[in-house]
Image (spheres, coloured by chain):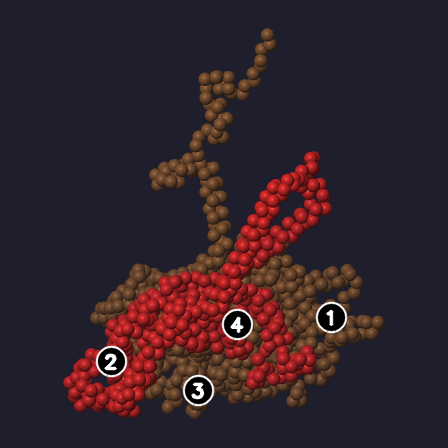
Amino acid sequence: MKIELNLQSLLRNNLLSILVVFCGISYSQDPDPLAGKKLFNANCAACHKLKKKAVGPALKGVTSKYEKEWLYSWIKNSSAMIKSGDAQAIAIWEEYNKSVMNNFPQLSNQDIDNILAYTDYVPPPTVAAVSNVPIQPVQDNSVSNQLILFALVLIFTILLTMLVLVNRTLKKIAVANGVVLVEEKKKKNITPIWEAFVKNQFLVFVSVVFLLLSSAYFGYGYLMQIGVDQGYMPVQPIHYSHKIHSGANQIDCNYCHSSARVSKHSGIPSLNVCMNCHVNIAEYNGEEDLENGYTKDFYTNEIKKLYAAVGWDEDNQRYTGQIEPVKWVRIHNLPDFAYFNHSQHVSVGKVDCQNCHGPVEEMEVMYQYSPLTMGWCIDCHRKSNLKLENNEYYQKIHESLSKKYGVEKLTVAQMGGLECGKCHY
Amino acid sequence: MKKKKTYWKNIEQIDKESSLIEDIENKEFANQLPVNKILLTQEGLESENTSRRDFLKYVGFSTSAAALAACEGPVIKSVPYVVQPEQIRPGIANYYATAIADGFDFASILVKTREGRPIKIESNKEAPDLGSANARVHASVLSLYDTKRIQLPKINGKDSSWDVLKSGVLSDLNSVSQKQGKVVLLTQTFASPTTSKIIKDLVTKFPNIEHIILDTVPSNYAVESFQDAYGFEGLLDYDFTKSDFIVSVDADFLGDWQGGGYDTKYVKNRVPDKKTGNGRMSKHVQFEANMTLTGANADIRVPAKPTEQKKILSYIYSAVKGLNSKVKLSPEHKKSAKFAVDGIKKFGSKAVIVSGLDDKKIQDLILDLNNHIKSLAIDNSARLTRTQSGNEVDIFINELLDGKISGLIAVGVNPVYSLSSGEKIKNAISNLDFSLSFSMKEDETSSVCKYIAAVPHYLESWGDYEFKEGHYFLAQPTIRPLFNTMQFQDFVLSIIGSSKDYYATIKAFWKQNVLNGKSWNKVLHDGFYKRSKKEKLKFNPKKNIVLDADFNISNESDMELALYTKTGMGDGQQANNPWLQEFPDPITRVTWDNYLTVSSFDAKRIGLKNLNVANGALNGSYAKISDGESTLKIPVVIQPGQAKGSVGLALGYGRKMGIQEEMQTGQNAFVFLKSFRKNQRVKIELTDGFHEFACTQLQNTLMGRGDIIKETTLEVFNTKDKEHWNPIPKVSKNHIETAVTSKKVDIWESFDRSIGHHFNLSIDLNACTGCGACVIACHSENNVPVVGKREIRKSRDMHWLRIDRYYSSEDSFEEDVDTKDAISGIGDSLTTFGKMEKASENPQVAFQPVMCQHCNHAPCETVCPVAASSHGRQGQNHMAYNRCVGTRYCANNCPYKVRRFNWFLYNKNDEFDYNMNNDLGRMVLNPDVVVRSRGVMEKCSMCIQMTQKTILDAKLEGRQIQDGDFKVACSSACTTGAMVFGDINDKESKISELKADDRMYHLLESVGTKPNVIYQTKIRNT
């Protein structure tokens, strides 16, 4: 079963390449869709999509619309064709708001053939059928753990049953043998345990103290968690998945939260930053999480919410100017009286974002990972070393402080990072 | 048969038939509680009378529900830009160079903006001249967020639109010109070359428009005199760095004389430095009636009432020019005048004489005298910031009142308020066919005009200026207009059918006439452009300046009124600015009021009193002041140094229209500004009642405590040892006199502060003029709340930085010390100290800015039970507001009394309806500094947010910090360089040099607190 599954996924993922490789080997002159895919992604994908209009028209079936020779010259130098008065060229130019397509003189006819082959490529239907079967990720570790647990429970149950059975058999044997089992009788006038407890003043004292202490402990614990919102995971107006952006697509945190490097705020990216990519990515084609209802349609729908907010008319590929700013729910809320500066930590201290924000690249829904309490800040300031290398500011201070404390590495605390006024003003 | 006795309480009890008792026994309440009926149906809710019980139930339920709900944290929304402007990065401040020119204050400034909101004003120190912001300019950022600003154009008091207003104005203008009616364009001084051109174009298109300039507080006589002498409208500018001998007759040039802004240059020559031989400083003689900042800083101050001043000036003129003079002077005046004459003769071209008297002849005489001695102080470029001249405005007023004018366009002026005939003008304007006011407020004038054109604040506007000949400045918007407003220039451009807006017009004009090939963007970035002026000012001397005849007349029964402008309020434009209302006057230290200043001699004569009530607050009697036409009932402050026979009264108060009720303080003194002369003859009478002042300083004299303000004379400073004039206090240990700074007498264990930064702030008492710019700068940097008059009166002011003003009780502070030292025995000490509480009639004055001294051995830190006050290695005394529980032990243990307690919640509280109580006003808050809550102590933090920012910037850029990088709000606001801030661990820095200076001392050094704020001994050139 396992092997079969793996084979299937292998087949699905690599069928295209296997097919292509196979084709490539047999007919080396024929257009190569795999090479075409690479070229398409490198040169065309910024403005074209296969099945949908983007900045330029959808390219699926473009070979059936135009002559191959016409396409060669159009791709290599479209503006020259428009100038020369080619009717088809002018028509498409006018249809797309007279925006000029880049010239690609570097592409050979063979390259263009490859690209066109990619745009025409239809995956074999059998493969599609196979890929519809949901594939469960294999989780070796957790299965074995559960197995062991199950086995243990089983063994204990068997042992327990055996014990009961043995006991019962023994009793039967005893009765059969005429052994009288004497039941211990309760002594009369024995004081009930609670009375004894009440009479034993020491015990009462100890338990009262214990009760008081434990209620104080839990009471304190309860009070201390007021205002600590660790794990706060509000529902956001747009379901933005850090798992997809930061995890699957490996986008650097600083790409969107660019002000974290220079400012006290990390900054919630403005919507124009989203549109840098999403002008081309209008639908979601990644992995799905069916259990939680995160289907492709769900994600695509969230992208549409972004378009509505930023006022992007997808059909005509232009901004309508009707905007509706997104009201995100703020997750990390430091109180006013605590000053925190991102750039100090990100750029000067070179602290990874994950240190405080947790495994963001695995978070489908963003939540507050750290408690953000003062104790938590201080702990880190005590332990963390300063990043003194190549920073001229620290040179003199480093020298004298290392001499004073007799250490080579300095912690934030030794630099004065525990002083009240450094964060409270 | 024994009968069973039944005791009954109620007849029902013995009636076996009645079921009532049973009912009562079974049910506690005879009637069902009507909860369901009431709560579950709409009719029930509407019809039922709610009983007391129900009410309590509801209250109980809702209270507990609310309490439970409060346990949940609030959901905070965060809304990012849809398209983020390139230059804005959240959390990072942007600075823009611009200029203020509101008709009273003219300066080139830098504006700090955060996320697109202007939050602070800084001086533009790179500007060649007029780049210094005073207290009013610093506060003007709050006036941008004034809730009383008019938000859209209005016609006849009703909201309108610009299109309707424009077409209305055009048709009215056309109909007036068809009838050959005259329209007067009454404007402030713009000092703007492009605006002049635009107005010229307007007058060409509508020839019936006449342009008249009205300065709210004019220098029209000086302008007229300058025009006679030099041929164009302007004012002579003086460069006091080039004078070693300054004689001023009623010219408050450290205040608002001829536009102010002279302090930077004046002070340059007032700080003696012994490094290059003997210390030198200029000598300054001041003749004046009111006690002004300038008089307080002068070496010799001579009180003289205005008529006497004229005589003195006449005497000096005659004596210097060698003419015969018939004026009779009192012996003291004669002595001082002679001293001035000798000085002028001795110093020759290195002397200068200035006067603020509103008299054409006097001003002629001043120009003549300065040119006669060829004073080097005369600047070749004239000032253009006051241009009202001659009697143009008087003619206009007469024509208006006679009905000879059919239309009025007022721009940036408020004649109904600021002219003495305001009431008549108000009626005349309301009878005009056409009246249009360009205003930010629905003020006294706008409210009677037919059209009100709402104009933007200067921080939302474009502008170009030529404050001085050849000194050009650009103003740019620092925020998109908050309201539906239009600049006057844009409006005129659209009326005359220009296709360009004001911005494009300025740019075109500058490219053609000003820039001379220089980059527009560079000038816009810098905010200024200086063009060297080649041609010299040409002086046409006047013949036959005769003075004596006029001056000998005086009516002894009259008092002489000297009107002045206060450092805080100026001409009253910003009366709705709570920062300025609460700004303590540098001299009287009174907030939220204007008042009559009288000398103690006259007060005694008339019976006017100043009393301190039980809680120390100041009460003053009311006086009736009358000039025959107008009468005011006004409270009195007895002012040491006020010339006998004269009284002073501040302009700019008493505004009623377009300002909040809390800000409607004082009385309008403009009613006395007849013919634009600040000196008038008045009668003063005592009237009933006492006025309650809010005064931030209740003790006035130093009582001979020479260690608070150390001072000496230039002669002693130059000839004697430091030990003589600035000794370190000593204590006796084992009968050996030991300096308090010595480790031997110190029980503290000190931190090692040699590593990293160690901040110190130096305050030079010689350079501090007491102008108070730092006070407002501190307010805006640190979100200091405004507490209102009532709280100030209870000494609950929140100023983190105060400028103490001290008077001497003898003629000088030195004599005070002698008097104190001569005291022997308890009886003598009681009487003498009692006497020393009273300031002298003409006292010496000293200013001393005091903020938290950031003691290395801080008394406040040791007494805090919760360690909310602690010390940083960088020398700052930290205050953790969130830790403070409000015991106020620290404030009690502070020898400098610089800690401030939040008695109430001053934000979002209707009891304190100032800027922090509305969304607009809160936009000025500095996002890097927390707004304090009720019940916590606060104080100067030595702008730790700024020092930390400087350090962070250096770390981010990976560089060492240079001297001068570290700044605090007060030091960067100080235009005279009195405050210097820096790191004393940087041995090369200016502050290290100052710390080692002979003049350096600590405040109350004998207490042993080892402060990080240092003072430089005051040197007087007496």
- Above or below for B1004 versus B372: above
Q: Nearer the viewer, mark 2 or mark 4?
A: 2
Residue highlighted by disc 4: A355
Mark before the other along the chain sequence, 3 or 1: 3
- Residue under disc 4 on the same chain as residue under disc 3: no
Q: Which residue is outermost to the top? A: B1
Residue placed most toward the observer, A33 or A391? A33
Q: Which chain is brown?
A: B
Q: Which residue is mark 3?
A: B530
| Label 1–label 2 contact, CB within 8 A | no
B588 lies left or right of A284: right
* Residues marked 1 and 4, same chain: no
Q: Nearer the viewer, mark 1 or mark 4?
A: 4
Q: Chain of mark 1?
A: B
Q: Nearer the viewer, mark 4 or mark 3?
A: 4
- Which chain does the red colour mark? A
Q: Please tell me in which quadrant of the rendered image residue A53 appears.
A: bottom left
User: Judging from the image, what secondary structure is the residue with disc 4 in?
Assistant: helix
C-alpha distance separating marks 3 and 1: 56 Å
Q: Looking at the image, which residue is at 27% across and 76% down? A: A124
